[in-house]
């Protein structure tokens, strides 16, 4: 692996993404065993530093660390001495003084994982920084697409929803294009950045045309807090124009694979009938999240990527 940290997928080497996916498959086999544990990261200590809520990312990182036999510590901002006025810098430098090897951080401020590299020497993995990037989510999405289709080069992937505020979208845009996939964005014009096409993607505001084009659709959560900002007229209108409903999918003569990073707003951006159908790979994404995060931790902390995981 060329990079010491995993801060984002912009300009990330293609071969490193492929190595993570390939290693993820091997760790997925470990997850199928009765004893789901390997000694790969024995003696390593990883701190999960979460300044924002999470279910999937936090639990899957913690499980990945435990499956690799690393020692793992969870930090929650709401119960820490930050509440007594301690600074971010003092907090992370005190944690590093306890001899840790890596930090997995989620933070609402874009760029905060890069900022953290200036304060500590530990390996940093970005678990989502505001509206910027969520690289491990994009890697698990790409692993799930690769597993489903057998390839990424030339795959047609649509990302539908609130693109402007989505770190999942940006990391997928970078990662998928590095891997040779074609990407189309779809959503309300108020939620798609005006410079989107500069990122090398297409933009199409007509969801039916997008479904006709796509092999797979990554459906993003509608962030209800955006409703107050006047960026969406109403949930009903959003659902009519951009909702992934059974009726809409059935009106097309082809099957399209559905992904969703979670958490889902059932009945808004996606219907339960779709989310729970065989064409959705949403729970495969969750399992691949553990396997691919094991791969990322192993490759960044172990330095033994040329060998098979033990
Ligand atoms: N996909 C995702 O990042 O989910 P969480 O916010 O629950 O971690």
Image (tube, rainbow, N blue to C red):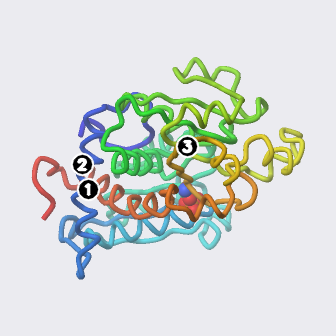
Q: Which of 90 and 239 is in front in this view?
A: 239
User: Which quadrant of the figure contains the C terminus?
Assistant: bottom left
In the rendered view, does 158 fall on the left or right side of 154? right
Q: Do the residues labelled 2 and 1 touch (CB within 8 Å)?
A: yes
Element type at mark 1? helix
In the rendered view, does 209 fall on the left or right side of 259? right
Tag 3 residue: 217
| Residue 289, x across and y down, in percent | 41, 59
Q: Are marks 3 and 1 in contact (CB under 8 Å)?
A: no
| Residue 7, x across and y down, in percent | 43, 42
Tell me where residue 86 sits by quadrant: bottom right
Q: Are marks 2 and 3 in contact (CB under 8 Å)?
A: no
Tag 1 residue: 25
Q: Name the residue: 31% across, 31% down.
A: 13
Tag 2 residue: 22
The numbered mark, 3 or 1, whose residue comes first in the sequence reads: 1
């Amino acid at each position: 692996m060329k990079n010491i940290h995993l801060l984002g997928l912009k300009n990330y080497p293609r071969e490193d993404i492929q190595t993570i996916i390939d290693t993820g498959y091997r760790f997925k086999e470990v997850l199928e065993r009765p004893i789901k544990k390997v000694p790969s990261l024995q003696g390593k200590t990883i701190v999960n530093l979460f300044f924002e809520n999470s279910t999937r990312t936090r639990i899957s990182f913690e499980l990945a660390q435990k499956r690799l036999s690393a020692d793992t510590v969870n930090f929650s901002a709401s119960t820490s001495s930050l509440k007594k006025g301690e600074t971010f810098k003092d907090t992370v430098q005190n944690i590093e003084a306890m001899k840790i090897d890596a930090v997995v951080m989620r933070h609402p401020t874009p760029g905060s994982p890069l900022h953290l590299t200036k304060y500590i020497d530990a390996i940093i993995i970005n678990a989502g920084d505001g509206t910027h990037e969520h690289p491990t989510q994009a890697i698990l999405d790409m692993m799930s697409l690769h597993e489903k289709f057998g390839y990424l080069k030339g795959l047609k992937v649509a990302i539908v929803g609130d693109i402007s505020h989505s770190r999942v979208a940006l990391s997928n845009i970078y990662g998928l294009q590095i891997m040779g996939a074609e990407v189309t964005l779809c959503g309300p014009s108020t939620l798609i950045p005006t410079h989107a096409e500069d990122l090398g993607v297409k933009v199409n505001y007509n969801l039916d045309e997008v479904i006709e084009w796509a092999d797979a659709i990554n459906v993003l959560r509608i962030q209800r807090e955006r409703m107050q900002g006047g960026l969406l007229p109403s949930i009903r209108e959003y659902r009519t124009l951009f909702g992934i409903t059974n009726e809409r999918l059935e009106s097309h003569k082809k099957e399209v694979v559905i992904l969703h990073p979670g958490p889902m707003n059932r009945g808004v951006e996606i219907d339960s009938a779709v989310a729970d159908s065989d064409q959705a790979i949403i729970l495969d994404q969750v399992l691949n999240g553990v396997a691919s995060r094991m791969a990322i931790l192993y490759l960044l902390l172990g330095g033994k990527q040329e060998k098979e995981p033990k």
